Structure formats: C-alpha cells, structure tokens
Image: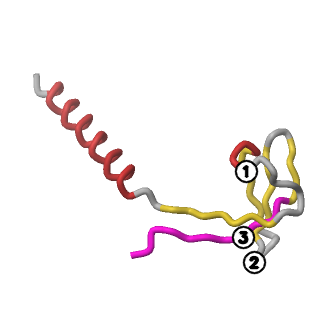
Amino acid sequence: MQNESAFRASLDRVEEGLAVLLLREDESVRFTIPRSLLPPDAREGDTLEIVIRRDVAATEEARRRVAERIARLRAKGGD
C-alpha cells in the first residue's frame, strides 16, 4: 500500500505571508500555503515538488487518544 504521493507546483507569488502555488499539470488549480512552509530560498517562478505522506503512527495514536477520551466520558456518565 502506497502511503505517499508527490506532485509539482509553481510558486506564482507571495501575498501577505501566503504562497500562491499553481499545479503544474493544470495551472487552473491554485492553492495557498503559509510562506513559512516553503524552503527559505524559494522564489517566484520556482518549481516545487510537494510530497504528501500519510503518517500511520500518528493517525493510530490520535485514534487511540480519542477512544480513551470517549471511554472516560462514558465512565463518567455512568456515575
């Protein structure tokens, strides 16, 4: 099972601390991210590789914490 995907985007511009990115495969698709998430040397016109990775361990830990909270709330309700 693949837990990662990657795509390329162009850094179109930076406005008020937000980077406007254009999907390379379809430049009509735009999205913004905080400028602070870009490499420090990224400049307008640069092509960036964006990697999205599923963090399985963090997901399982979050689910465990939620399940524990639900169990505690149910236990309190039964008092």
Q: Is residue 9 left or right of residue 73?
A: right
Badge 1 density bin: few <14, some 14–19, many ≥20, Cα 10 Å:
some
Asked where in the image residue 18 lies, by quadrant, the reply is top right
Badge 2 density bin: few <14, some 14–19, many ≥20, Cα 10 Å:
few
Q: Residue at x 78, y 73 (%)?
A: 24
Q: How far apart are labels 3 and 1 at the CA level?
A: 13 Å
Most frequent secondary structure within the magenta stretch: strand
**Range of the magenta residues?**
1-11
Q: Nearer the viewer, residue 23 or 45?
A: 45
Q: Which mark is residue 59?
A: none
Q: Nearer the viewer, residue 55 or 30?
A: 55
| Mark toward the start of the polypeptide (2 vs 3) | 3
On the image, the x and y values in percent for residue 77 come to: 17, 27
Q: Residue at x 89, y 57 (%)?
A: 44
Depicted 45 relative to depicted 65: above or below: below
Q: Is residue 72 left or right of residue 61?
A: left
On the image, the x and y values in percent for residue 43 come to: 86, 55
> Would residue 10 be counted in the magenta stretch?
yes
- Between label 2 and label 1, give the one nearer the viewer: 1
Marks 2 and 3: CB-CB under 8 Å?
yes
Q: Is residue 76 left or right of residue 23?
A: left
Query: Which residue is tagged 3?
Result: 8
Query: Which residue is tagged 1?
Result: 38
Query: Which residue is tagged 2?
Result: 25
The quarter of the rendered structure image containing the C terminus is top left
SS under mark 1: loop
